Each structure stands twice: as C-alpha cells, then as structure tokens.
Image (tube, rainbow, N blue to C red):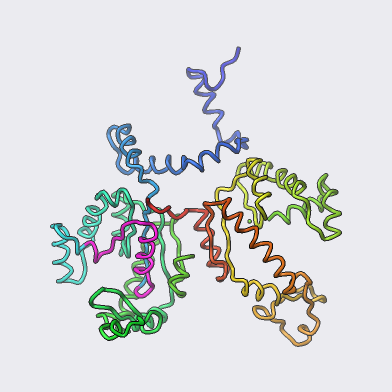
Amino acid sequence: MTRGPSDSGPQGAAALRSSMDATTAPHRIPPQMPQYGEANHVFELMQNMLEQLLIHQPEDPIPFMIDHLQRDNDYVPKIVILGPPASGKTTIAMWLAKHLSTNLLSVEGLIAKEYSPLAADARMHYQKFKMVPNMLLIRLMQERLKEEDCIRRGWILDGIPETREQALTIQTLGISPRHVIVLSAPDTVLIERNLGKRIDPQTGEIYHTTFDWPPELEIQNRLMVPAGISEGETARKLLEYHRNIVRILPSYPKILKVISADQPCVDVFYQVCCGQLLKEAVADKSKYGDLIQPFFEKDIAVPDNIIMKVLKQRLDQQDCVERGWVLHGFPRDLDQAHTMDSLGYKPNRVFFLNVPFDSVIERLSLRRTDPVTGERYHLMYKPPPTMEVQARLLQNPKDSEEQIKLKMDLFYRNSAELEQFYRDAITLNGDQDPYTVFEYIESGIINLLPKKVP
C-alpha cells in the first residue's frame, strides 16, 4: 500500500509540495479549472485578499478576511485619471463616472464638502496659497473613500495624485486603483485648446469656441473666459505637470494605460488566426492536410467539421493549455461558436471591431500588388514610388467592391448572432490608427473595465 499526496503526516505534506513543484512542469491542467477560476474571479479574489492582508497586517487575519469578503467591493470601479491641463480628463472622468454609476472625486469636490472640518481647513489653505498640502488632501480623500457610497459603488479620482509623494502615500494607506489612465497630447494642442475654453457661470458647464459651442444664444451671451487660461499660464502649468507626471508613472507599472487625447473626447472615451492553422496543416502534410488540400486548390470554404478537428488538435497542444490562445476571425458564425463551446473551448475575452462600411471599401478596394517585386501597396495610404510601378500594379479579384460587399453582407448577418452569443464581448471602434486599437484591446485583456454598479 502506498500513501498519496493527500495522506496526512510529513510524508504526505512532502508529496504534496513535490506535486506542486514548478520543476516538475509541464503540468496538464484540465481546461475546466482555469475556466472556473476565470468565471468566478478566483485568481483576482486571492490576489486582492493577499494584498489587503499585507497592507493592513491584522493581528487576526481570519475575521479581517471575513469582513473583507462581506464588503464584496473588490470589483467596483477604482480608477485614476491623470492628464495635463486641457487634455479633457475631467470630461472623461465625468462621462465614465456616469457610465459606471460610480463616484467622482476631484480636488475641487473634496474641498467643497460641507460639514467637514478637514474640508474647511483645506478651503482656507486653497484660498490663501492656491493649493492644498499633500497630507491634508490625502486625509480628505481617505475620509471620502470611507463613506458607504464609495465602498459600495467605487470611485474615480480626477487628477489625483498630483505628485509622487501623494502617489506613494496613497499606496501606503492601501488605496489601490485597478486602472490608471493617463491622457497625453502635444503641448501646442493643449495650449490652443485652453485658449478657447469658456464657462457658463450659472451651470458650471465648460464649452469651447471651436469644439463645443452651445447652440442656444442665451447660453452664448453669458459665457465667460475662465481665469488662468492664458498662453503663459497654461505653459507654466504644463511644465509643472510634466515635472510631476514622470515621477508618478513608475508607481503604477502594471495598471497604467496611456491614451492619446489629441482626438475627440468621444473617441478617447470609447477607446487573434484560424486560416493560418489550415495552411500549416497542408504544409506539414498532416493527416488533415490531405483533407484540406482539395478545398484550397478549388478555392472553396473548408467544412466546419474539418476546421474544428484542426483547431482542436492545435488548442490541445501543451503550449495552448499552459499559456492560452488567441483566435482571429473565428468563429465566423453561430454554428462554429456553438461547436467550440460544446468542445469546452470557451474564450474569456471576445472583441468585436466596428469599422464603417465606407472605410472597409476604402481600405480593401485600393490595395494593389506589384507582380515584379511582390511588394504590396495602397493607392491612398502607401502609394507606389513611381509612375512605372503604378502602371504595372494588379488588384486581387477578392478586393473588388462587388466581392467586398458580398463578404460584408455575410459578416453583418453573422456578427449580430455572435454578439448575442458572446454577451460579455467588448466592442471597439476599429476605424482608428492601429496603435490606438491595439492599446484598447491590450487594456481589455489585461484589465477589464469594471461593470456598471446596479
């Protein structure tokens, strides 16, 4: 008779440690285990619990953990939004707070709080020195975050922390944001934006002479130029911001997201391949390659049952089991999605890229290939260098407008059903530069935005 790792005693404990030893990898982990962990946030739960224990170091960890779990607020929004003057951070913070039904905290809002001795003290400092001392601001923020609505519905910090000292103090107190968003734009753009700012003294709403002018004549007539927006004052504020932000960013290495603010606020707010597997199967002369080859030669679609066999073979390989996988353009329709689901291949992130039909036509129909060199060109985005090259360029028949329209009609019919099937999918605006789209996708993979609080 032998004793397994689950048996009691020193030998059982040693066997258990041995079974978990990383040097015995690779381990074959059943796919149901990570799926359960992902679906029930087990990994984040353990990480958050460990963080809170190390920060607060309670004498008796058990009651502390029970109290922490009963709060059930690990997944409420906890977001920091930073950016230079005129970057639109307050507008984005307000929209995000409304979208997520959470609380917006700013320096102005904290010091305006009524019935708070701390806020009254902060107002005196601000009126006298046009700033609030670091520790006083932190204490104000601590006081606000302990209130029930912040515990239950989360928070967004607008422009806080302002300095590295504030950032480190916030971390020391155990105030840990899940996302830190930094808006960035050229100083020349920001100065120009700031010069056009106007404020409605009755509502406090901010408008702009170029980008956001109110249509109502009554509002137009009462708008005022806010203080501190001259070119010199804005340049001074930008200099101070740049001096501080480079020291703040290292405090948030894994949750930091830099977004270009040199675009409309709406775009700022709303900011992997199965075909390759089939080609590899043919090239490798695998048992499925012989089945696929005739379909490639006749340029017709490979049946779903063959695609799923090739896909299953690849996803069951050790690297996919250990490191995960990314599918691009698959599943293409609801039947494929159901088949994947029935086989246990359930993605934990799904992204839909939306691109206007006119942009799709422009991107694809203007593609050309040089038959001499094999170089690919685009008549608008990457035109040929000479007239001689342009004269010999050829268009792939698949890139004709007629073929594109047929594919798009099929895509629109299938995507509507897929969006219903993958209800937690993230939809992105794909009609932006590739780097911006990549940043949005990366953000969705690393840290999903918090869900709305009911």
Residue 354 drawn in magenta: no
Q: Is residue 76 above or below residue 231?
A: above
Q: Residue at x 77, y 83 (%)?
A: 389
Q: Residue at x 31, y 76 (%)?
A: 206
Instruction: Residue 376: tell me if it is visible.
Output: no
Q: Is residue 276 left or right of residue 4?
A: right
Q: Give the prevailing secondary structure in the magenta stretch.
A: helix
The range drawn in magenta is: 85-110
Residue at the outermost top position: 1
Q: Which corner quadrant of the image does residue 31 belong to?
A: top right
Q: Is residue 382 left or right of residue 50?
A: right
Q: Residue at x 67, y 66 (%)?
A: 408
Instruction: Residue 15: tell me if it is visible.
Output: yes
Q: Which corner quadrant of the image does residue 66 belong to?
A: top left
Residue 102 drawn in magenta: yes
Front residue of 226 and 222: 222
Front residue of 432 and 341: 341
Q: Is residue 397 left or right of residue 180?
A: right
Instruction: Give the total number of marks visible in the rendering.
Output: 0
- Quadrant location, the N terminus: top right
Spot occupied by residue 112 in the image (x, y as percentages of width and height)? 19, 64
Spot occupied by residue 404 in the image (x, y as percentages of width and height)? 71, 70
Spot occupied by residue 401 in the image (x, y as percentages of width and height)? 72, 74
Q: Is residue 292 above or below residue 436?
A: above
Spot occupied by residue 67 in the image (x, y as percentages of width and height)? 30, 37
Front residue of 90 and 318: 90
Q: Residue at x 38, y 40 (%)?
A: 49
